[in-house]
């Protein structure tokens, strides 16, 4: 009887979810439905701006200042799903080109090119996937540099005798640790090796802008006169 009660409690904890400061707290992998409040907030912002007849320059400023700020809060805590990122970028693209969130107007330039730096003829928007990974990289940086209870637990039970850049994930690991390992794998892949990735964490100060450049796709200059003519 007692064993059945404990099993029921554990089952309920596995699906445990509540909200704190507008963010979901959960024990399982993040789902797209849990990110829907973020998408709804972005839509609400865009709907409140639709009637103001903003110019392209005005829309650009609002996307950079307001929408990017809303995304940053979530991106600093969770690795967002690609489907969620696609929805966010689609909303921003529609707002930029049509001034509305539900318009069907064709985008004149693809979003990846829009996100390129100004010196490469883009508008300098943050590429959401790269920005998300850059913010979450702070978790790994803290494991390397900041002494904490979490670091002690991770080194003793998860990393053990290995390095954080070489340890392997296990099937039964918690979703949070799986996220860290997945992000670590991306860093190792882009850096070229675990040793090269470890060298990038030797800086005493964490700089999100540098990590955003690290994760961003390689920029290529767009010759707009060729595109237009």
Image: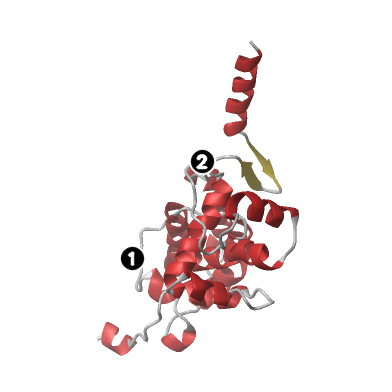
Q: Which residue is mark 2?
A: 172
Q: How many numbered tags mark residues here?
A: 2
Question: Residue 54 at x, y = what percent?
Answer: 53, 71
Q: Which residue is mark 1?
A: 106
Question: Residue 14 at x, y = what percent?
Answer: 58, 33
Compute the Cα span from label 1 to label 2: 45 Å
In front of the other: label 1 or label 2? Answer: 2
Which residue is situated farthest in the left direction here? Answer: 229
What colour scheme governs how the chains and residues are painted in the rendered image of this protein? secondary structure
Secondary structure found at label 1: loop
* Pick the front one: 159 or 17: 159
Which residue is situated farthest in the front direction here? Answer: 161
Question: Residue 74 at x, y = what percent?
Answer: 60, 56
- Image position of 164 with respect to 30: above or below: below
* Res. 189 image quadrant: bottom left
Q: Residues within 10 Å of mark 2 (few under 14, many from 20)?
A: few
Quarter of the figure that contains the N terminus = top right
Q: Is residue 99 visible?
A: no
Which residue is situated farthest in the top direction here? Answer: 1
**Which residue is at a point 46% across and 58% down the rendered structure image?**
85
Which dot marks residue 161? none
Quarter of the figure that contains the C terminus = bottom left
Q: Earlier in the sequence, mark 1 or mark 2?
A: 1
Specify whether 103 is left or right of 71.
left
Q: Is residue 11 visible?
A: yes
Question: Residue 106 at x, y = what percent?
Answer: 33, 65
* Res. 19 image quadrant: top right
**Which residue is at a point 57% across and 78% down the rendered structure image?**
210
**Which residue is at a point 49% across and 46% down the rendered structure image?**
170
- Image position of 23 with respect to 118: above or below: above
């Amino acid at each position: 009887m007692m064993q059945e009660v404990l099993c029921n409690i554990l089952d309920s904890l596995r699906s445990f979810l509540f909200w704190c400061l507008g963010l979901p707290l959960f024990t399982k992998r993040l789902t797209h439905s849990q990110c829907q409040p973020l998408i709804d907030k972005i839509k609400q912002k865009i709907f409140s701006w639709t009637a103001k007849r903003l110019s392209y320059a005005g829309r650009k400023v609002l996307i950079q200042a307001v929408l990017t700020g809303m995304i940053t809060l979530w991106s600093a805590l969770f690795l967002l799903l690609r489907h969620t990122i696609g929805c966010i970028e689609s909303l921003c693209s529609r707002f930029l080109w049509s001034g509305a969130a539900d318009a069907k107007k064709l985008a004149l330039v693809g979003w990846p090119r829009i996100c390129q730096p100004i010196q490469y003829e883009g508008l300098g928007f943050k590429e959401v996937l790269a920005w998300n990974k850059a913010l979450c990289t702070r978790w790994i940086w803290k494991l390397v540099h900041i002494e904490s209870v979490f670091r002690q637990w991770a080194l003793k039970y998860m990393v053990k005798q290995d390095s954080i850049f070489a340890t392997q994930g296990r099937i039964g690991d918690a979703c949070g640790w799986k996220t860290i390992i997945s992000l670590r794998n991306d860093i190792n892949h882009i850096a070229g090796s675990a040793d090269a990735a470890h060298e990038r964490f030797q800086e005493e100060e964490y700089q999100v802008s540098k990590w955003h450049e690290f994760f961003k796709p390689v920029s290529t200059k767009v010759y707009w006169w060729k595109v237009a003519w």
